[in-house]
Structure formats: C-alpha cells, structure tokens
Image: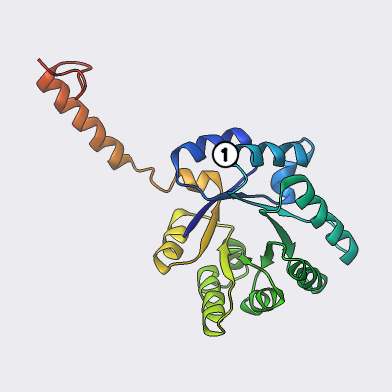
Amino acid sequence: MKFIIDDANIDKIKEIWEIYPCDGVTTNPSILAKNKKNPYLTLKEIRDFIGDEAELHVQVVANDYQGMLLDANTILKELGNHTYVKVPTTPVGLKVIKELKRNSINITATAIYSPMQGYLAGKAGANYVAPYINRIDNLGYNGIEVAKKIDHIFKNNNMDVKVLAASFKNSYQVLELCEYGIAACTISIDIIEGLIRNDSVAKAVDDFIQDFEELCGEEKTMSNCIK
C-alpha cells in the first residue's frame, strides 16, 4: 500500500516525511486555502522537497470542460509531468478524464462516493480513483466496503486502475484497508500521527531506560557504558 500525506503545510510535511515511509502528497483546493498564500508557491515548495519522482496530486478548480483542461495543463507546466491531475468525477469530469488520458496525463479521479462512479472514472482513463471513506460513512453507507467493492470491480474487469482511499476519521480505517491490500491511502497528518501513538509503547520504552540506568548509571546508553 502506498502511504501518502494529505496536507499542504510544508513544515508538517517535512516532519512526517522524515519519520514515515511516504510515497507522495495529495492536496485539494480546501487544503491549499488553509495556507493563505498563492497555491503554486505552496505546491512548488512541496514538489521541491519531495522531489520529481514522488507523487504529487493537485486538483483542478474550474468546473467547465475547457477550464478544467486549462487548469490541468497549467498544473503540469508548473509542477512537472509526474504530477497527478485530480478531476472530480462528475459528467463533465469524465469527459475531461477521457481527454487527459488521450494525452497520457496521470489522473486521479476524486470525489468518489459510489462504486459506479469509481468504475466509470476508471473506464474513462483514471490512474487512481479516490473514494472518500469517512464522507461515505456520514451518508449512512460503509466507506471501507465501497473502497473494497471498487477494487473488486477493477480486478474482475481486468482494469489497470488503483484505488487511492481518502478522507479517514481514524487509524483503524487505514489499518482495515492496509490489511485488505488497497493500492494507496492518503492520510491527514493528525491521523498519521495516531497510527503508532500508544501510551503503552511509551511506558515500555521509559521502563527499559529506567532499568538500564539502574544497572549502569544515569544517562548511560549502549554507546557510553563500556568500561
């Protein structure tokens, strides 16, 4: 499973990137708006930091066909061809995805709420489809099962499309999809930080240190306890 950060705060991204085995960064217009500066300044900072090979997912904002295509071409011009253009899965979005596919552009179909949306986006040419796990739950459905069903549809129809699960409310949802073998998850920083946060782990480490210092002396470690 690819492990992707869902945020645009460069300082937080750097902190998480240095600790966790990350594969890329996803953004959307709402995430970019939180930084309160020109979006391309933010996105270029992220691209410069993560490098040309890591995935960067950037969403079009226009909602008409020509405007979406113009947004897509500008995104690629400014951020490089390894950038994935995120396109909402609406009727006009499907038309845009088909055109971008004809030009061999990497596409992430976003705002996925149903298996049929996922199928149509994949059939139109998306590389990834991004079901919103928590938002689907909030509509009274099961977001995890929707993501799995979309993945089954792709596999059963021999479609070369991957599920990029998004919008998580807790770490257990991430664990369920990791155990299942979903292709990728994009996770907000607060959820990432909770993936291995555990008071029992911290207590165990503190106990190890205390026991070792009782044996060898205060502030002694394996590097300075040799006699």
**As drawn, 18 above or below 28:** above
Residue 130: quadrant of the picture: bottom right
Residue 166, percent from left and from top = 58, 59
* Residue nearest the viewer, comparing 20 with 141: 20
* Residue nearest the viewer, comparing 9 with 140: 9
**As drawn, 66 above or below 51:** below
Residue 213: quadrant of the picture: top left
Residue 74, percent from left and from top = 82, 51
**As drawn, 50 above or below 168:** above
Taking 207 as reference, is 149 left or right? right
**As drawn, 69 above or below 221:** below
Q: Residue at x 48, y 36 (%)?
A: 18
Residue 191, percent from left and from top = 50, 48
Q: Residue at x 25, y 34 (%)?
A: 205
Q: Residue at x 21, y 27 (%)?
A: 209
Residue type beneath disc 1: Ile
Taking 91 as reference, is 146 left or right? left
Residue extending farthest bottom: 157
Residue on which disc 1 sits = 13
Residue 222, percent from left and from top = 19, 25
- Callout 1: helix, strand or loop? helix
* Residue nearest the viewer, comparing 127 with 4: 127
